[in-house]
Structure formats: structure tokens, C-alpha cells
Image (cartoon, rainbow, N blue to C red):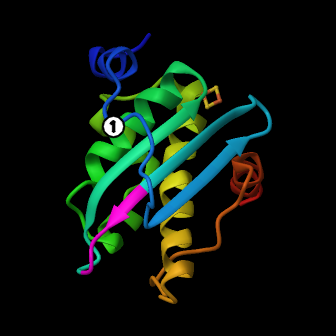
Amino acid sequence: MYTDKVMDHFMNPRNVGEIEGASGVGTVGNAKCGDIMRIYLDIDENQVVRDAKFKTFGCGAAIATSSMATELIIGKTVQEALELTNKAVMDALGGLPPVKVHCSLLAEQAVHAALWDYAQKNNLVIEGLEPPVEDIDELEHEEDEE
Ligand code: FES
């Protein structure tokens, strides 16, 4: 049911932990499954993500997607990090079962929330960045309505 890559990132997650004095921290959850993900970003003066770490209280797919998401944004600019979609994270993992797609949305949104926190702290406007939601379940319902 899960690809080898998903299993690898679940069993050996990369970048677990927290960053003290992080440039931005974002926490999102999904009220429906109760899972919570927190992402820490260390961003340098050129707006490049120097480091990213995560703590996820959630299912295996949430752990694998947070691990992969942090891997994908390290070394990227904040704009590139913002453009990382949950689909890109899933593709990098070789796919997720349909019932687990929402777990990858948690990773995408936790990155956005951390970028938002960084922008707020530094009085910056990151083009295309929307205020974060605390519960991604709301987002999924918005998508249903479209
Ligand atoms: Fe909720 Fe995976 S089941 S994040």
C-alpha cells in the first residue's frame, strides 16, 4: 500500500526535531484525524532556507510527508518553499494512497504557516502567501465546494 520511499521516510525520518530561535515556526492540525505537524525554518539574510526541522504527532504518511517536505525546501528560497505543493511532496515519495492525500496537505500547510510566521516577524510580504489555517480540515471542505 505504501511505496518504499514512504516507508523509508517513515522509518528513518529526516530532519526530526526543533530549531532553537527559528526564523519561523508553523503548526497545523487536522481536527478530523487529530494529527498535528509543526515545522521550524531557519532562513538566512538572502531569504534562503538554511535548515528545516519538524515534529509530527500523526500517522505514518504525515511523518513521511513532513520528512520529505523538509528535505525538499532546505536550500530553497522562501518563494520556492512557498511553491512546494502537497502533490510535489507526494510525487517525491512515489505517491500516497488516496485516503492519505490529506496528510501531505498538512506538510504543505505547515510550511506555509512557518513562512507566514517568518514574514510576520520580519515585516515582509511574501507574494502569494495566504494567512495560515490551524485546521486543514477547513481547507479540504473549501476544496469540496469548488
Ligand atoms: Fe491525519 Fe495522516 S491520518 S495526517
In the visual, does 35 lie left or right of 85? Answer: right
Q: Quadrant of ligand 1?
A: top right
- The structure residue drawn at horizontal position 44% and vertical position 53%, both measured from the top left corner, is 20
Residue at position x 30%, y 28% from top? Answer: 94
User: Where residue 134 sits: x, y (%)?
Assistant: 72, 55
Q: Which residues are magenta?
A: 41-45
Residue 49, percent from left and from top: 29, 63
Residue that appears at 48% across and 68% down: 115
**Left or right placement of residue 35 versus residue 78 in this view:** right
| Magenta segment, prevailing SS (helix, strand or loop) | strand
Question: Relative to the observer, which residue lies in front, 103 or 26?
Answer: 26
Quarter of the rendering containing residue 32: top right
Name the amino acid, label 1: Asn
Query: Quick check: can you spot residue 127?
Result: yes
Compared to 71, does 81 lie above or below? below
User: In this rendering, would 33 be left or right of 3?
Assistant: right
Q: Which residue is mark 1?
A: 15
Taking depth in this image into account, of 117 and 2 the one nearest to the observer is 117
Image position of 30 with respect to 82: above or below: above
Q: Position of residue 118 (x, y in %)?
A: 48, 72
Q: Does residue 44 lie above or below 92 as drawn? A: below
Q: Could you classify mark 1 by the number of other residues whose Cα lies within 10 Å: few (under 14), some (14-19), or many (20 or more)?
A: some
Residue 42 shown in magenta: yes
**Farthest-out residue, left:** 75
The extreme top residue here reads 1
Element type at marker 1? loop
